[in-house]
Image (cartoon, rainbow, N blue to C red):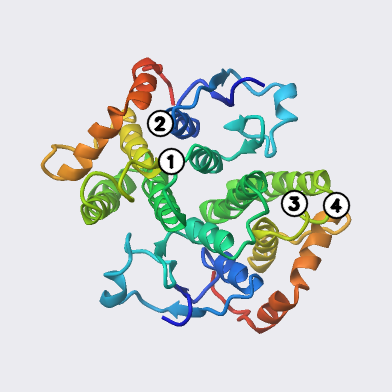
Amino acid sequence: MSQPTFYYFNGRGKGEVVRLLLTFAGVSFKDVRVENIDDALRARLPFGQIPFFEDNEIELAQSGSIIRYVAQKYKIAGDNNVDIAHGDAIIESIWDVLTPYWQTKDNEEKFNKYKTETIPKFLTRWEELLLKNGGKQFVGKSLTSADIAVFHAIDHLNFLKVYQLETTKYPTLSALYTTVSEVPALKTYLAARATDSKF
Amino acid sequence: MSQPTLYYFNGRGNGEYPRLILSFANVQFNDNRVNGIDDALKTRLPFGQLPFYEDEQVQLAQSKSIARYVAQKYKVAGKNEVEVALSDAIAESIYDLVNPFLAARGDAEKTEKFKTETAPRFLNNWEALLLKNGGKNFVGESFTYADVAVFHALDYFKFAGVDLLGDATKYPTLNTLTKSVSEIPSLKAYLDKRPTDSKF
């Protein structure tokens, strides 16, 4: 096989962080967007689910596992085990922010609570964690997968029209967002990706 | 600090999984069961949440991150990067079972769907993956934290009143795995002494 291949639906959802990480790491990969999982593909999926990733070493399911495998392999997870662990926890936290959107969006009261309490709680924590590490990135001394993941969370909240990050309220987080979006490889990817994804 | 410390409420919830991994890895740790989060503790929590883990190197939130850090540190995550990733995926898969179960509680239709569709799909997958790896454990040649993660999921369901494995004939390899994991000495020592009257 010549290139790593990533299989996911034609949307952002659980796949976009992987795409962003591979792009950030400068990895040429096949970005396969699946309309329907046909029998041939399903037979290869450990849990019958996508996203699914394969390269010449591994066939891997589970979005989180793929994120961590790619980050580790292409050395963007952090410089030592402590930074990697702290970055790991920050990446986990983005799902505490994104998952409730799907869980609450059809219940006005819960959705309101999500928007007015849950999201700001995490944004505040992220702002604090950034400052605690010097303000430029979440762990270590350069951008890691944790920064890309939080970028995605903020970007996706905006995309879903749920929340737009206030620059004055979260200046450090806003600066990080801008920095990540201007990493050349990401800038190219972001400019070219579809804007009409359904999720 | 002399020992690693895990902070969680006095229940299973999201704290039990790190407890099991720490025990499996034979780590002497403070199993700090707190009644509530006081101000002193809250300021130390990266996301204001428990579980929270600290040792001489890290102060770590997020139950799954704690499990992965402990597994990696004490060398029970897998023998190489591929095994680590495959174990990671098995450990992740338990949430595709646990989360729908939690979401279905109180809803008869969703619970039915969980029992007749979601659960069997995962149990069949796990049974198949075990067999594909020789039948004794999920990844490589010895137990990794992936085996303990699946044990935890099935054990938690039983604790919540749902015996997913049912009679041993339906998922024989999975059944045998849960028994052998429960008999790993360091894990057995924890299982024998943990509270049996946890409320969650």
Tag 4, which chain?
A
Foreground tag (1 vs 4): 1
Residue A176 visible in rendering = yes
* Residue position marked by numbered label 1 in the rendering: B76
| Element under disc 2 | helix
On the rendered structure, is B185 left or right of A147?
A: left
Residue under the image location 68 percent in, 53 percent down: A79
Q: Residues within 10 Å of mark 2 (few under 14, many from 20)?
A: many
Asked if marks 2 and 1 touch (Cβ < 8 Å), the reply is yes
Residue A75 on image: x %, y % = 62, 62
Asked where in the image residue A16 lies, by quadrant, the reply is: bottom right
Q: Answer with the quarter of the image where residue A72 lies.
A: bottom right
Report which residue position mark 2 lands on: B24
The residue under label 3 is which amino acid type? Gly
* Residue A169, disc: 4
Judged from the image, the secondary structure of the residue bearing numbered disc 3 is loop
Quarter of the figure with the N terminus of chain B: top right
Q: Nearer the viewer, residue A42 or A195?
A: A42
Residue at mark 1: chain: B
Q: Chain of mark 3?
A: A
The amino acid marked with disc number 1 is Val
Residue B165 visible somewhere in the drawing: no
Question: Mark 3 highlights which residue?
Answer: A140
Whole-angstrom CA distance, mark 2 to mark 1, is 8 Å
**Kind of residue at badge 4:** Lys
Q: Is residue A110 above or below residue A42?
A: above
Q: Position of residue B97 (x, y in %)?
A: 36, 47
Q: CA distance from mark 1 to mark 4?
A: 43 Å
